[in-house]
Amino acid sequence: MPRIRIGVVGCGLIGQMMHLPHLKELHELYEVVALCDVSPGTLQYVGDYYGIARRHLDHRELLKEPIDAVMVLSADSHGQVIVDALRAKKHVVTEKPMCFAMSEADEILAAHKAAGTVCMVTYMKRYDPAYRYVEPLVRGLRDLQAIETTVLHPSETNQIGHHDIRRFPDVPAPLRARLRADQDRLIRETIGEFTPLERHVFADNLLSTLVHNVNVLRALSGDPAEVLFTDVGGRGEHADRAPVSVRRARYDRAALPAGSGQLPGDGRVLRQVGPDQTRVPVAVLPQHADRVVVDSMEDGKAVEKRVTPSMKEASKEELLHFAECVRTGARPDTTPEEARGDVALLHRIFHAIKRPLAG
């Protein structure tokens, strides 16, 4: 099979830390043909580093390149880039959040249906060997009592300080203002007028961080019957402490507490309670293999089993999955339809906050 000719939109943190190194490693499957970024300095640095000559400041120009697929890694909502790529009949693999507003989600689904190409959202934890190990255990429980997913998001220094990430403050002021206005318009469409703190909670906490946990929760047990409450306990830079409780159809409650962690890596934990209890400490760093802990009772004795399902890295696994879907036409495990449902639930979670939030 010929290599997938791919263009990358967005050359910032997640591209430099995860996706571009994996694309280079998977050189037998992918050929990175062109790059796009709104920062001229970032674009030049990444293009020089990876030896990619075709470079663009506008994603619409990148779509004119001889490419088969587009990887969307730009900041904030990815809706417009996804729609434009699908209308250009390209395969699309996009970082989360897929979009901010439901109008964007519906436009993406319509463009995807018309394009007939593969569209996949990169919820990397769904491709993590630890999640793959746990999923059938949870789905097989007849007496599931609760699920809890926890986010302890580290500081940027602890998460990426050991990586050589280059970013340049050179986006032209008029363009920066227009991009900000576009994102604010989408947020306003969804939540109405907002304070700076409400913008932070909606865009940075819920749609950029908690979206992973919501996706895992919905994949394991579907949509909740009700969002019971959402409480923002912090202010300013610590306003990502947002405990969420939802009522499920199959069981009483699921909780999605979030907070600021100090350890490196991404301290996400999935725990489900049924006849047995499973805990999944989840790391985002490639050198940290995720472990599964299963607590159970055997002959009246408490037993703890620790499993490291694999040393494979989730972000690389999802790129392998995307390549297979492009090759065979198979439906990805993480679809835009699923991402639409995640965004809809996050809207419900936000509206369960007692507003306004001053900050």
Image: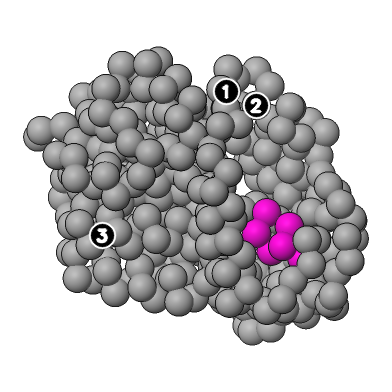
Taking depth in this image into account, of 325 and 199 the one nearest to the observer is: 199
Q: Position of residue 80 (x, y in %)?
A: 39, 61
Q: Say which amino acid is labelled 3.
A: Leu
CA distance for labels 2 and 1: 8 Å
Residue under label 1: 165
Q: Does residue 56 lie above or below 145 as drawn?
A: above
Q: Assess disc 3: are there few (<14), some (14-19) or many (≥20) residues with their C-alpha within 10 Å of its C-alpha.
A: many
CA distance for labels 2 and 3: 32 Å
User: Looking at the image, is mark 2 or mark 3 earlier in the sequence?
Assistant: 3
Which region is colored magenta? 198-204
Q: Quadrant of residue 45?
A: top left
User: Looking at the image, is mark 1 or mark 3 earlier in the sequence?
Assistant: 3
Identify the mark at residue 160; answer none if there is no mark: 2
Quadrant, the N terminus? top left
Residue under label 3: 86
In the image, is 163 to the left or to the right of 85? right
Q: Assess disc 2: are there few (<14), some (14-19) or many (≥20) residues with their C-alpha within 10 Å of its C-alpha.
A: some
